[in-house]
Amino acid sequence: MASADAVLEIEGLTKVYRSLFTPAGVRAVDNLNLTVRQGETYSIVGPNGSGKTTTLKILLGLIFPTAGSATIFGKDIADLSVRERIGFLPEDAYLYDCFSGEELLDFYASLFGYSKARRRELVDELLTLVGMQANRKVPFRECSKGMRQRIALAQALVNDPELLILDEPTSGLDPAGRHQMTLLIQEMKRRGKTILLCSHFLAEVEEVCDRVGIMYRGRLVAEGTLSELAGEPEETVVTATGLTGDLAGRLSALPTVREVTTDTVRLDHVGEKDLWQVLQVIHEGGGEIVEVSRPRPSLQDIFVKAIREEAQ
Amino acid sequence: MNPIVTKVILAVGLALIVAAAVVTRKVWLSGIWHAVPSVWRIAKITVAEARRRRVLRAVIALVIVIIISMTFFSYLSPQEQARMLINGGLSAITVFGILLAIFVAAFLIPNEIENRTVYAILAKPVRRFEFVLGKYLGALIVLAAVVAIMTVVLVGVLLVQDRLVEDLPDSAFNPNIGQVVFAAAMSYCALAVLTALIVLISTVSSTTMTVISAFIIWVVGSLQSQIHDLAENAAGAAKLLLLVMYHLVPHLENFDFRFQASYFQPIPVPAAVSAVLSGILYTGVVLIVASVFFNDRQV
């Protein structure tokens, strides 16, 4: 059902690759349903070959679906006017490598029909935004991976798009480059852009995304906000000093305690009364309480769990 | 060629263009105004990219060296030397022009797909047929520049040589520069037709297959009279194959006016006009088919 604030809606999208050797076909995307709402940052995560890039290529009209449909801003993806309002950062920044960042941005801006004066302004703005002003005349082939990725992001922004589609934006970048790219994505988010991001760098996804969809073998196997996907914390961890000897024994004897080490007590996710009991035992036994936490599983944990369950 | 056959081919070509235009009307009618600037921008970037390739400069330099080196045959009479210079120069322009056309056109679209540079372009408001036409136009501009440079060098060499031999007894060098330029322009028309066909093949096959096909087309297109004679004497499947080749592959020899230019013969204007018109028609049909094929291609 169409949602009022949906920017992107995918219904039953299926892509089957057939060849002489695989007459039955390989299902790259299998009955995918997905909605990205206005202003949100949605990330599709999944292992290699899970259908992430295929999905993006269908949305951009580079390949065609076997079944199903997709709309962007309420219009069919084949509608050319849709592409006036979207920006796409391809994986590995595939741009003409004999041109400089300045020339490339001027060319991509010209495809939107901007005047020469407007293009000059735009190129300046974008090169400043992505921190490439000083290297504006360096040929793309001589740029580092990080510089290339920033120019590629800039070309995706030439039309000030409402929807940004980013395919593995931090792929192949060093930690500093990844950090810079993450900051740029956060800046885009701050500017109100709707972002659809494909990545398998889960830490960066955790940092920038509002909702996550986990794809596996072409299907969406889990979807939601990070807290929805994480669910309720399963345990409480008390970090303390002096958890040795008799005190450790007394703690282990408590029914809610799972595990005691020299500096932590792990207990089932319990109510306040049980927690107080544990804290009291530590205090009376001469231990010093440092921290009480209820850790949620990381996206990595959620991802691995979802994939494992799906594989079974 | 039999004039009736030519007329039939022209009529079929025209009918195909009209049919293709009707079938694809939704594609071109709504975006006709959008298409022109987009095609031009793609063409400009194609030209700019080609200008930075060293191979282009190398080919031009090689042809210039060949043309200039032909002036060293001082044992020939002035008229023989003029003939050799004109024929050799035009042949060099044709052969290297065709080689360049094959290598420029065969890589135009497959390279964009293999290097994935096409992604960022097709994700912008650019229709696929605009991309194909832009690439073709870019290749045409590059080839025009190359043929023009090589022709200017040939004409320059002819004029210098004319000046050098004018005081010699029995001087009959007197090259007809107009005919030379005309013959070079007709060679360029052949390149334009061949390039369109290579672009069409490249929309459905790999770079290697495109290059191989382009060479076959070049050979077949230059030997159409012989293929026609062979077809008349053949039978069964061989005859059919030869006839298909004869009617589908462009008649590149119709654009060849080297003989008239080097033997100072008058240019058969109706034949030239007919060749140009049928070339335009053929190119139009081929580019429409190429756009339709590329429109369905998964990149």
Image: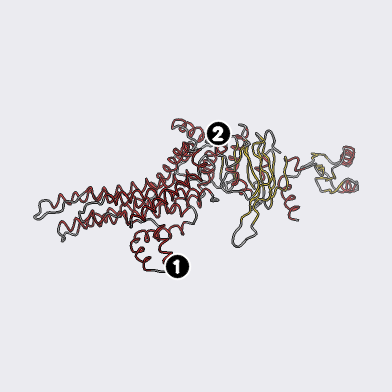
**On screen, B263 above or below B131?**
below
Same chain, labels 1 and 2? no
Q: Position of residue B150 (x, y in %)?
A: 29, 50
Q: Quadrant of the N terminus of chain B?
A: bottom left
**On screen, A302 above or below A84?**
below
**On screen, A242 above or below A17?**
above
Q: Position of residue A5 (x, y in %)?
A: 67, 33
Q: Are the two marked residues, 1 and 2, in contact with CB atoms closer than 8 angstroms?
A: no
**Crowding at mark 2 (Cα within 10 Å: few <14, some 14-19, many 20+):** some
Taking the image as shown, residue B167 lies to the left or right of residue B291, namely left
Q: For the residues carrying marks 1 and 2, which lies nearer the camera in this image?
A: 1
The residue to which callout 1 is attached is B237
Chain at tag 1: B
The residue to which callout 2 is attached is A160
Identity of the amino acid at label 2?
A: Asp
Identity of the amino acid at label 1?
A: Ala
